[in-house]
Amino acid sequence: MLLLAAALAGCPDRAPAPAPESGPAAAGTPAVIQPGGRLVTALRAEPRTLNPVTAVDQPSLTVLRRMIGDLVHINRLTQQTEPAAAASWEVDDTGTLYTVTLREGLLFSDGHPVDADDVIFSFEVFQDPEVASPQRELLVADGQPIGVRRLDERRLEFRLSTPYAAGERLFDSVAILPRHLLEESYRQGAIDRAWGLDVAPEAIAGLGPFRLKSYVAAERLVLERNPHYWKRDEAGRSLPYLDEIVFLFVPSEDAQVLRFLGGETDVIDSLSAANFALIEAQRPAYRLEDLGPGLTFQLLFFNLNRLPAGALPAIAARQQWFRMERFRQAVSAAIDREAIVSLVYQGRATPLWSHVSAGLKLWLNERLPRPPRSVERARQLLAAAGFGWDAEGRLLGPERRRVEFSLTTNASNSERMQILTILQDDLRQLGMAVQVVPLEFRALLDRIFRSFEYEACVLGLGGGDADPNPSMTVLMSSGGSHLWQVEPRTPLTAWQEEIDRLMERQSRTLDPAERKALYDRVQELVAENLPFIPLVSPNVLVGARPGLGNFRPAVLDHHTLWNADELYWREGYRK
């Protein structure tokens, strides 16, 4: 894990953070750079939307974060905040009043000027409970949204109802929206339907280094250089250097590796350990990096949604088991995490008993127990919950019905498919009959967030920041990524209610030690009650073709494209 600064744990800076109006210089940019060319990468699924207000899936976010901009940006390599659309900011002594100054001459990617009204509009949209943006819970404290007031065309005041522990990091999550393009949709209550994949390139704009050029369904999405981007390098040249970024839709990692080895793509992200070794053996000249444990973790969760009366009766019947804490504890006890690390990740991962990954050493509760796998302990837990076994060793629920359920994940992820096979075998040893059901990624998300037509699932979750606050969207019952219980958005148990209170409290606690204690207690509640079952934290494994300048992969997402505005091709390598 990269060095974590004390600012991640507590007090916001009290001093102004100035930046030159031309923007901070790109690191390591020699004068011989010849801008131009394109970078080709691959996504394992098509984006679901190009709307930053509603996007939750990784493909959408990967594309959008090259197109949008925020006031203050978290540098994914240093993990420190730095000016973006804001040239500077000041915080008062109470930690509740921020005065922000926008850059002079700031333009959206369509050339339209940016002013304070665009910022006010953006915060209004993201904080609107009717819009239900996944970022909203990060911007609300004590039930009160952040107050935004215009001082003049370039200056704004942001007033928080209570001190915010992560300081100016909260501004990183809010894309500055073009009021001239989106206000009508918002006032008509249709902002969630804006900027779908059928949007015309001229109808979408942002503050990022690239803008939409074209989209071909089931094939590719192309971004082109934003000629109005504010950032310049140390020689005064406008960024980005690249003319285009091309996202190919390649539904499996193995197929992505073949394209990477064949030179069709230039960078590759989130590699499996097996494919990392394959590329290393076949293309030793390629640049490959193992960044160690990241922020992402793989988890198993059951469908705990409150289903409408009479809907999905087979799933509703199995939920009687899923809602039993001892059932979930038994499943966790039976899982061979060490086997997952060894067989799936070839040792390039860490077993987990907490939702805090091994890469977040500053926040990890080291006191949490890490019990070894025990089928015997799992059987004891099941027996105590009223389960039993028939003469053939098949597990029966308290109602004497055989325990069987389906377990799904996205078919394009080979590692998760291997995990499902291991889990299927582990749970067979308890007498459970588990059916593996792989799904296309978008179909899987629809089942998790809309139809609730699934029983158990393995997915990966990860943070874009090394701070507890982004995990509010996962841990709080109202959170947009509260996967196992999307409905209702209220706590159904005393321990979930306590997690909600603790996460709210830590978000406004400025004392680092007190905040750490609060988050430690959250981890204890998750480990005890297991609303989801943490499995492993994979190492971050990435690669790039030779000749890609300023390639500086980071543990924080996006690992390889976080500094896309600074990437360039060295002489002789440009595509």
Image (cartoon, rainbow, N blue to C red):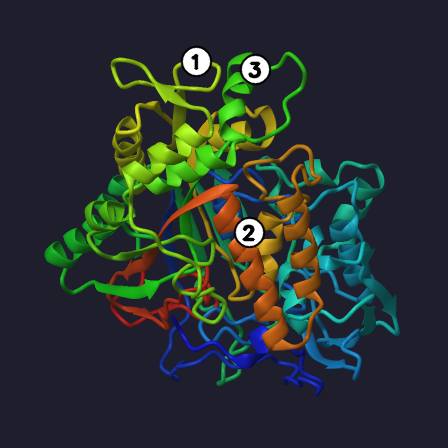
Estimate the spatial distance between the alpha carbons at disc 1 and disc 3, rounded to whole Å: 21 Å
> Looking at numbered disc 3 in the image, what kind of residue is underneath it?
Leu
Split into 4 quadrants, where in the image is the N terminus?
bottom left
Q: Is residue 306 above or below residue 198?
A: above
Q: Which residue is mark 3?
A: 312
Of helix, strand and loop, which one carries label 1? Answer: loop
Q: Is residue 437 above or below residue 165?
A: above
Q: Is residue 314 above or below residue 330?
A: above
Of helix, strand and loop, which one carries label 3? Answer: loop
> Residue sitting at 29 percent across and 47 percent down?
337
16 sits to left or right of 231: right
Residue 401 percent across, percent down from the top left = 43, 13
Question: Between residues 274 and 355, which one lies in front from this camera angle?
Answer: 355
Mark 3 surroundings: few (<14), some (14-19) or many (≥20) residues within 10 A: some
> Looking at numbered disc 1 in the image, what kind of residue is underneath it?
Arg
Of helix, strand and loop, which one carries label 2? Answer: helix
